[in-house]
Amino acid sequence: MKRQRKAIPIFSVLIVDDHKHLVESMAITIPWERYGVSRVFQAFSGPEALETIAGQAVDILITDIRMPVMSGLELIERVRASGHDIDCILLTGHSDFQYAKRAMELQAINYLVKPVRDEELLRTIGGITAKRLERLDRQAELERLRDAARDQIPRLKADLLAAKAQAELSVHEERERIAEDIHDIVGHTLTATLFQIEAARKLLVRNDAEGLTRLEQSQQLVRKSLQDIREAVGMLKHPDEDADLESVLRRFAAEAERMAGISVHCSIGLDWPVADTAIIKIVCHALQEGITNGIRHGKAATFAFGLHEEAGVLFGSLRSAGIPYGGQALGFGLRAMQERMRRLGGSLSLAAVRDPDGTLLSFRVPLTDVPDGATT
């Protein structure tokens, strides 16, 4: 048997009756706190009740039907028309079908015939406060889920970029074998992510259209990323042999902007096309790793990438505007990138920067295909 949650006294009641002594008696003698009611307001006519509702937060309205100037039915009708979220209880000394019918039309919670026993009224009050507490719990859970979804979106974007970067690196090294592995492994991972987001969407769809919209956008992003990876797999056997470093970098920056919703400003100054496959691969992956870490750890949305050649050496930098690097040990991806740079005779470093706050990833790598006649 489900255990009923004890009502916390956070709700308010407004009692309305033209018999002042009845209102005061109900307000004083009934143990409201036991049923989640912390404040009890009193009014002795319909217009006075509307003034109270206009100036106070009222959750439950208890009103007599027959009153001068404005009946209880008219009062509830005015409350409904104003859009207030108030549960209404009608009290009457007359068991009249027309009254009961109108009460149902106005969506009154209950229709009680005087004299009303305290137990009967409190049973109705307890049911109302229990439902309101359940609604507050659902709203709190909805807020928690929405905040969790919002916090996960940047990480999801970064993880997608990381997955794409790792996929492209593996494909380049073992083109024929990795083609099927990428489709299976990455495809499975992203598809599983879609199912998780779909489950979250079902929790949010009941109450919050904003949460639903954000999750649907995330789903579209994941689906598009999955399609991009499948297209890349399909092109593995027909690579673009004429690609040069600058065009590849600008293409990747544009794709990162589209996929992750970030801004990447590129300043590339090369005097000739760099077509060395190893150089293209390592510089591209340095850019990918820097953007991925900038989004994931630095919460960055703006990046500035610079690349130039000097004396046969490529010098690159990626500045992210976000949380500065705190000096912690580098993750697997950056350590692996450092090692690959070292094997090519280059280096890679990470440092915090200020004005504005952010992180600077710098690298250098010597060129092996400097054209004859180029300045060195």
Image (tube, rainbow, N blue to C red):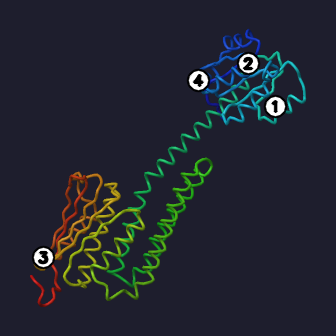
Name the residue: 73% across, 26% down: 124
Amino acid beneath label 2: Ser
Residue 342 is at least partly visible in this image: no
Near mark 2 (Cα within 10 A), the count class, few <14, some 14-19 or many ≥20, is many
Choose mark 2 or mark 3, whichever is in front. Answer: 2
Choose mark 3 or mark 4, whichever is in front. Answer: 3
Is label 4 in a helix, a strand or a loop? Answer: loop
Frontmost residue, 358 versus 83:
83
Amino acid beneath label 3: Glu
Amino acid beneath label 1: Ala
Which comes sooner in the sequence, label 2 or label 1? 2
Which comes sooner in the sequence, label 3 or label 4? 4
The location of residue 48, given as percent across then percent down, is: 69, 20
The location of residue 255, given as percent across then percent down, is: 39, 71
- Distance from disc 2 to disc 3, alpha carbons, whole Å, reads 88 Å
Q: Quadrant of the C terminus?
A: bottom left
Q: Is residue 235 placed above or below 145 in the rendered structure?
A: below
Choose mark 4 or mark 1, whichever is in front. Answer: 1
The tag on residue 45 is 2
- Distance from disc 2 to disc 4, alpha carbons, whole Å, reads 26 Å
The tag on residue 103 is 1
Q: Is residue 350 left or right of residue 33?
A: left
- Distance from disc 3 to disc 4, alpha carbons, whole Å, reads 73 Å
- Distance from disc 1 to disc 3, alpha carbons, whole Å, reads 85 Å
The residue at the far top in this view is 21
Amino acid beneath label 4: Pro
- Distance from disc 2 to disc 1, alpha carbons, whole Å, reads 18 Å
Q: Which residue is mark 3?
A: 310
Q: Is residue 18 placed above or below 159 in the rendered structure?
A: above
Q: Which residue is mark 4?
A: 9
